[in-house]
Image (cartoon, rainbow, N blue to C red):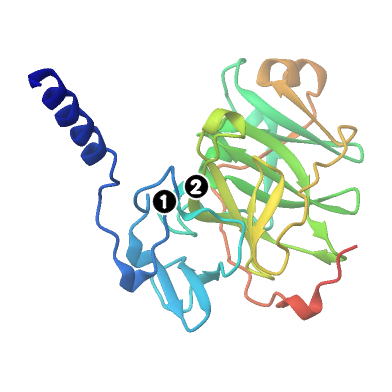
Amino acid sequence: MAYRIIIVFIYLAILSCSEPFGIIDKNHNATIDEECIAYKIDSSLIVQDGNIQYLIAGPTNHEKFNISDSDIDLCKLNQGLGREYFPALYEPQYDPIEKFSYDDGMECIVVNDGKIKKIFPYCVLSQHETVNETVNGEAVMVVYCELAKLAAVYKRTYCDKTLTFAPSGYTYFDNDYWNGVQGILMWDRESESLWWPLNDKCLSGSMQGTTIAKASFQVWEYMTWGEIKKQYPHSISVSHEQEIEIPTNLPSYSLEDISCP
């Protein structure tokens, strides 16, 4: 009899421990799933306005992303330092490489712009994370994420619209991609959609579901600073100190303006 009582006690203890823990603030419409017991971000950053759910993006009420019916799992979202903390470059400036003294092992992205080789050292990219450029008449962006060690060049034209990108101030992870590492979550200023280059998808906004496309490898490549000095001694490298003016005269694209195949 004592043996059966012990077995019953252990069973009840296991049941009690299997209940989820943590308090969810229903005023902020927190959602949970089997793998998440609470937001990884401050729940005050999620705002519900009628049927629309917003993700706060900056210090003012006007800085927010519409994430209603998005592909974003809020349990996989992590907050950063604000969407302008790492200032994207919109009109990057360059100097001849002889003005710089990087270690020969410094990793870089080399972009072929006609006869000009434009160099993007990782140490400079880490300060901006996103560089908007036009190469051979094609709008592209150079993206770097220190957390995921992602560095690549992507196209900026989707659904017949040329977009201007910047870091969103948030990172995102999914165990199905890149072994669950945190990665930069980007946004475009025209449609205010959120894009995640680790799975090559737009996760929210007017562009939701659109695939992020890398620029042709004929346009860019990986090289070290030492290799660049030997092969492209007349190339130019993105400057350290730049005056950055956030563009304010960009078009605004709603869902009605977007026509994707």
**What secondary structure is found at the residue carrying circle 1?**
loop
Residue 77 showing in the rendered view = no
Please tell me whether residue 44 is drawn above or below residue 22 in the rendered image. Answer: below
Which residue corresponds to the image point at 67% horizontal and 21% vertical from the top-left? 225
Q: Position of residue 259 (x, y in %)?
A: 86, 71
Residue 209 or 65: which is nearer the viewer? 209
Q: Is residue 97 above or below residue 16?
A: above
- Residue that mark 2 sits on: 171
Tell me the CA gap for discs 2 and 1: 7 Å
Residue 102 image point, x, y percent? 57, 23
In the image: residue 215, left or right of residue 5: right
Q: Quadrant of the C terminus?
A: bottom right
Determine the residue positioned at 61% across, 39% down. 144
Viewer-proximal residue, 209 or 9? 9
Which of these two is toward me, 258 or 50? 50
Q: What residue did someone put label 1 on?
A: 80
Amino acid under disc 1:
Gly
Q: Are marks 2 and 1 in contact (CB under 8 Å)?
A: yes
Q: Is residue 139 left or right of residue 149?
A: right
Q: Residue furthest front?
A: 1
Q: Quadrant of residue 44?
A: bottom left
Mark earlier in primary sequence (2, 1): 1
